[in-house]
Image (tube, rainbow, N blue to C red):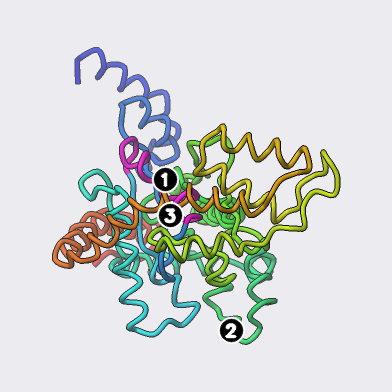
Amino acid sequence: MALHKNTSLIRFLLSEKRIIRLNPFRFHQIQPRFCKFVNMKEVVVSGIRPTGKLHLGNYFGALKNFLRLQQQFDSYFFIADYHSLTTHPTPGDLSASVKRVLAEYIALGLDPEQCTIYFQSDLPETAELYLFLNMNAYLGELERVTSFKEKARTQPNNINAGLLTYPVLMAADILLHRGIKVPVGKDQEQHLEMARTFANRFNRLYNNEYFPEPQAFSFEQNLVKVPGLTGTGKMSKSAGEADTIYLDEEASVLNKKIMRAVSDSGPSEPGAPKSVPVQNLFDLMGLVSATDTIQFFEDSHKAGNIRYGDFKKQLAADMEIFIAPLRDKIQTTLGDEKRLNEIAKFGAEKARASAQKTIREVREIIGFSNR
């Protein structure tokens, strides 16, 4: 760094001496401004549960952003196998799902040299920070979480503690690397707000501004929510096979799913608004089809003469054009087990260095000796 830049850096740090004086841990309170000042990369953290194949919602809701984030930030992308235990997968299913998600990450363009890709369970520090944060998470606030209430309603025989404390584990995942930016879907915004709550609560309890406040991040203006094919809401494996479009979907299966997608009986009159299921299909078309194609069917619906059969055929054709190259890359990567094992080991080592530093400092802040 040039001399004049060193001088400016010293002035910057002196201007912030009220924050870092006597307590180097509190440096993280100015981390975003410092990173920008000295051209360091801010930390991004995000992950996906290995509950089966990745689908279109995973791609547009998270992975598409990951590909850009890895180039611009210090990015940690993990496969959330701890989170998946709330649904009690068999050991065989869990192992296969974890391997598949890693292969899909790599096939879709994540570069282990540019970012850190790791399995959540490879970091015991995750569980330790989860424990510390749980000590300051309260029953009432956890029971009010929308996703927990929905799970309690739809699966009353499996309301386990992992579901209740899911936001705490998510906070531990983010704060373990002191993440600043978190690329999340719209359905995760409440969980991220709770991560900020837990970070600030820890800071207040120990009078130490150690954890930064993680913020939702997307390159798009609004967070992306990809609808499913059954007309019930966002695309989700829990809604059934008919609701999802997998990133390695075979062409014949893809066509069948889209042709059977929920729509309606057609506009009741010219200018009639779209029903929710039909709007969902238009939203999907907006992800993969050309602008003039979309406009043609928009005009047809507005005129009241849209033919849903033709509409779905076009959507299926455009979706296959999008899916086909992804499918080929995923199948090729899955077959290279040696490379996948090397990537997993490399990612675990990189992630562990960050995690161990955080846990060492957190233990010291709490009052535990680091033996």
Residue that appears at 26% across and 17% down: 5
* Residue type, mark 2 in image: Asn
Amino acid type, callout 1: Lys
The answer to whether residue 207 shows anywhere in this view is no
Question: Which callout, 1 or 2, points at the residue further toward the start of the chain?
Answer: 1
Q: Is residue 370 above or below residue 266?
A: below
Q: Are marks 1 and 2 in contact (CB under 8 Å)?
A: no
| Viewer-side label of 1, 2 | 1
Tell me the SS state at disc 1.
helix
Q: Quadrant of residue 191?
A: bottom right
Q: Residue under circle 1?
A: 64
The N terminus appears in which quarter of the rendering?
Answer: top left
Judged left or right of residue 283, residue 360 is left
Q: Which residue is mark 3?
A: 174
Q: Which residue is mark 2?
A: 158
* Labels 3 and 2: the sequence-earlier one: 2
Q: Is residue 69 magenta?
A: yes
* 15 and 125: which is toward the camera: 125
Q: Check disc 3 and give the amino acid type.
A: Ile
Q: Which residues are magenta?
A: 56-74
Mark 3 → mark 2, Cα distance in angstroms: 26 Å
